[in-house]
Amino acid sequence: MQNRSFLFYTGAVSAILLPFSFEWLSPLYGLILVGIALLLQGDLHPNKWLLLASAAFLDWELISIWWSTHRSEGWQDVIMILPIVLMGLIVGSKSKEVEVKMYRNWALIFAYATVAAWSWTVAESLFKSGWVQYNDLELGGRLGIHYQSLYLLVAAFILEASLWDSANKKYKILHALLIVWLLFGCIMLSARIHLLLLPVFILVRTLDLLQGKIANKKKASLWAAGIIISMVTLMAVLPGTSRRLTDLKNEWRSMDGMVDGKQTNHRIYLWKYGWNVANKSPIIGVGNGAGDELLHEALQSCDAVFYKKKEPYYLHEFKYDFHNMILQNFAEGGIVGVILLLFLFAVGFLQSQGSWRYAWALFFFTGMTESLLERQAGVFLLAFLILQIQTRNSSTKHR
């Protein structure tokens, strides 16, 4: 019992704290506990690719501070990504022989915690407003819309994978209902990157299942088609979601300038000016920590007017990041930084299993519209994804 409980329960605490994200109890504490558990009880079991990817990513983050004009911010960025690289170095060097079932339970605990946190958030909104105010929905009071939607989708894929591992009909029905609730939540939140990705990922997952050994492929295909049709219908019918899609259409039409009084999304300007910042030093970047500062300076010349409800504002009035994980890394670390970041993601994706591969892919594509590594919610989730590679380390003998 001692052999299996210490690491398992620390991982379980980490899984629970992630979606709840309490202001008074950070998910970082759970990650620290599970890291300590691996260090104390784990055996040396080098994973050279994960070690190399984690060490190289950290080294370049440190080296690129040297030529940065904002070194204090660079050191803050290093501290921000420490949970990722430390988890990579620990998991890459240590492993603990535990039944693979324990790690699957970690995934389920994360999924159940996400369902509970999301349900509580919706209930709280209903109690306070009489209806769901999606702009006010924040898991644990800290996770914004894109992060919530990402967590819900990861949890949905975990629960979907568990459907095929159980013969218990009631268990399958429960998980199917929870999946529907989570997907409905994603539609309710209306993070547009996920509205676009959701049908694609369901289709890819269906093709993945059809290549496997599931018992009834025709039934699986019909279920997938039904879910996609239902999701698309809800997107078109629900007022909040349809309005977001209409905004997306107008923003697409207005990328080259205002059309019919409609301005494009502020991200287009952040990417445009961010690209100019990155081109100042495309090989090694402008230096860790300097990206946001130089972007803010560049936005001083942006005369596009945006509106928060009816209040006009300019982009230089706020401190923005690049709203793109790759572009942010390109600006601060150059081509070298991008290659190292992609290497870390490739290792994580290829060395993960089952639903966690979809989690890595979802994280990466969400990073195309958000600088996920500039926020704790993104950093903590990525560290947790790296922890799942521990399953591969410990289960080599059992596969």
Image: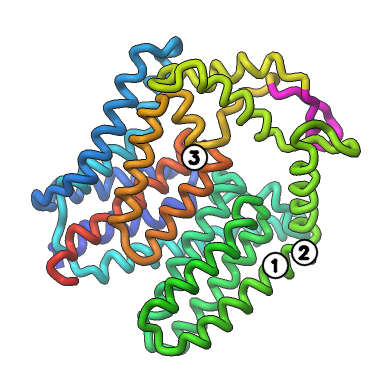
Mark 1, mark 3: which one is toward the viewer? Answer: 1
The tag on residue 51 is none
Residue with the mark numbered 1: 232
The tag on residue 236 is 2
Q: Which residue is drawn at the image coordinates 28% and 64% (left, top)? A: 103
Magenta residues (range): 304-315
Q: Position of residue 342 (x, y in %)?
A: 38, 41
Q: Nearer the viewer, residue 229 or 167?
A: 229
Label 3 sits on a secondary structure element that is helix
Q: Position of residue 276 (x, y in %)?
A: 58, 21
Mark-to-mark CA distance, 1 and 3: 27 Å
Identified by mark 1, the residue type is Val
Mark 3, mark 2: which one is toward the viewer? Answer: 2
Q: Earlier in the sequence, mark 3 or mark 2?
A: 2
Label 3 neighbour load within 10 Å: few <14, some 14-19, many 20+ = many
Residue with the mark numbered 3: 372
Which quarter of the figure is the C terminus placed in? bottom left
Mark-to-mark CA distance, 1 and 2: 6 Å
Q: Which residue is drawn at the image coordinates 54% and 72% (left, top)? A: 178
Q: Nearer the viewer, residue 28 or 224?
A: 224
Q: Which residue is drawn at the image coordinates 79% and 66% (left, top)? A: 237
